[in-house]
Image: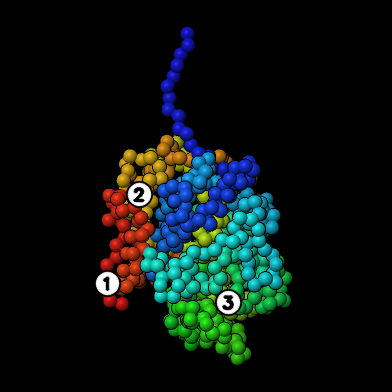
Amino acid sequence: MLSSQRFTVSCKYVRREFRELCDKDRTSYFDALSTIYHTTTEAGVALYGKKFRGSDYFIKKHLGATTLEGCTPWHDSEVFVTSHAAFNLELEGSLRSIDDSLSAHYWEITVDSKRYDRNWATQSPIFSAEMFGSYDWDTTDDHSFIKDGRFTDVNFYRCGDGDSIDDTCPEHSIYGYMIDANSYQAGGRLERSASICGIPTASKLPGCLFAERALKSKNLKHFWKNVELRYHGDQHVIIGGVTGCKFAIEEELSGFDKDSTVMRYVEDIMVYMGQWDRTLFSYDGFDLGDYSGTVKCPHSVEDCADNTVDCTCTLPTVLKAIEDGDFDLEYAVNVLSETGLYEDIAGAAGFAASYDVDDADGDDVSMTNWEKAFHDISREETEALLLYIAKAAVYQARTLNAYSNSFGSVNDPIFWAGHNSWERMWHYKRLELATESEQKHLWWNSWNETNLLNSSSAITCSWSSSADSTLPFYNLMKDDATTGQYYTNKDMLRMFHPHNKALPHIYDSLEYNHCSENEAEDEDFKHSEFRSKLSSKLRKRMAQQYGAKVKKGYSEEEATKLNKYYDAIFDERSLSNRDSRPIYEAARSR
């Protein structure tokens, strides 16, 4: 006798690692991604339907209003996990509006670290014409455009020109480009470089040890820290690169071998300074001290009209001292002290520092103990390093390439490769809970309600950081509880669970077979850890700035601009909880 059974089947799209795609599927994905980067949202909706989003939409949304608001809605807390999962699902919807067979595929970056070591930029197929485009190694060229493939002609979108800036685009460069405000790239064509101020990067990409740490996270908060601050970490500057430096490393430190320890320290610190420069920008007009003088940043294209003017943030007092021959080690040490750079470096958990600069006895870098600032390098190397770092601090590189500016990094299509693979780690951790205790389930399925403004290291916007914060994401999957509403963090924590039958995607694999069971810590890991700890110092400084801004309150002009921006970002006016979007009230007239 025959029997029958009934059961429900869920149909899901499969996200695959780029290298595991067949040629046809890979070509279809990159053709569609190219369409997204060459078509405005307005034009694309007319062609492909209402799910289409062009790169202009994603760039403006991910940029936020960071300079004006003093914070980021999408980073530096657990919101990094929920919001970037939502960004990826928005991208997937846009891809599928072009070709309904597509998924938001991913790049497992630890594979490249394992296979190609420090040669990833030349050997990885990720950086090839077939995928995201090759690096151009022609060092005689003043630019670092993508050499080949579909994205060689990607250009920045404009927010407007001069005084006619779009009110919904508060974060932009002085040239009107939709990119971080501290970007001084004059041309509008996308650039990407695997070099830092003239030397090819010697850093490996995040490796298996960082993946292992994320996979061993005990709760969502630890997972976020391990993913954003380490696994995701400093890959932005390493992949994006820094060009347009006034003081080239290869010239200033020509006496040292490119593979020497001192050169590794230089690269570590310069990668960090790609982020640190934003704080220099924020001190525009501020007098740092007798040696450093006042920070000067251009505010308009007119400020850069004179070819003798450095069109970037500088410390003119120090530049004059260098020009006049008055810049020596003592001067450099004082610049490092006044800018806070030495404290950051020496306080990075003891890897580069041999003592605690925060000690109450005043033990800091000085003319009697500066030679002890770094482990494993000689007195001569330490002196050369301190001199170079101080010089680099006085002149922000003209071209912090798009991917190096983490908020405006969506300008580079490589963003979507580098911000997806960690989500399968999240799936792994939540599926792992099947046999775990109720307490562990609670740790992973509940939101940390810490008051982030009281945290010493968070620059997350207060309006986006709580479980019930309303975020500008909606209609990404079938979900009865959120029909007609914008999502909250609590909603997305539930909806992105891999057990949710309505979640439209799964991953091809949750395994890390390329990683050894007991990966050994090597020099590259230590340098990566050093850079991670440097970044934590920067985040504390930025958090202090944000806290001070919140305490002072926003001016009438600032509040007006922020309200126009969020009115545009929360773009579906019919949703019932739209009034829960951030709405600013002026606390002062200016």
- Is residue 150 toward the left or the right of residue 163 in the image? right
Q: What residue is disc 3 on?
A: 392
- The residue that mark 1 highlights is 587
> Helix or strand or loop: what does disc 3 sit on?
helix
Q: Name the residue nearer the viewer: 2 or 290.
A: 2
The crowding category of the residue bearing disc 2, from other C-alpha atoms within 10 Å (few below 14, some 14 to 19, many at least 20), is many
**Mark 1, mark 3: which one is toward the viewer?**
1
Mark closer to the chain start, 1 or 2: 2
Q: Residue at x 52, y 77 (%)?
A: 312
Q: State which tag comes first along the sequence, 2 or 3.
A: 3
Q: Give the distance between the C-alpha atoms of the residues marked 2 and 3, in whole angstroms.
A: 43 Å
Quarter assignment of residue 189: bottom right
Q: Quadrant of the C terminus?
A: bottom left
Q: Residue 165 placed where, x, y %?
A: 41, 70
Residue shown at 56%/40% (left/top)? 509
Query: Where is residue 455, by image quadrant?
Result: bottom left
Q: Which residue is mark 2?
A: 487
| Residue sitting at x 36%, y 63% | 565
Mark 3 surroundings: few (<14), some (14-19) or many (≥20) residues within 10 A = many
Among numbered discs 1 and 3, the one appearing first in the sequence: 3
The Cα–Cα distance between marks 1 and 2, rounded to whole angstroms, is 29 Å
- Residue 39: x %, y % from top left: 50, 56
The answer to whether one can see residue 76 in this image is no
Which residue type carries mark 1?
Answer: Ala
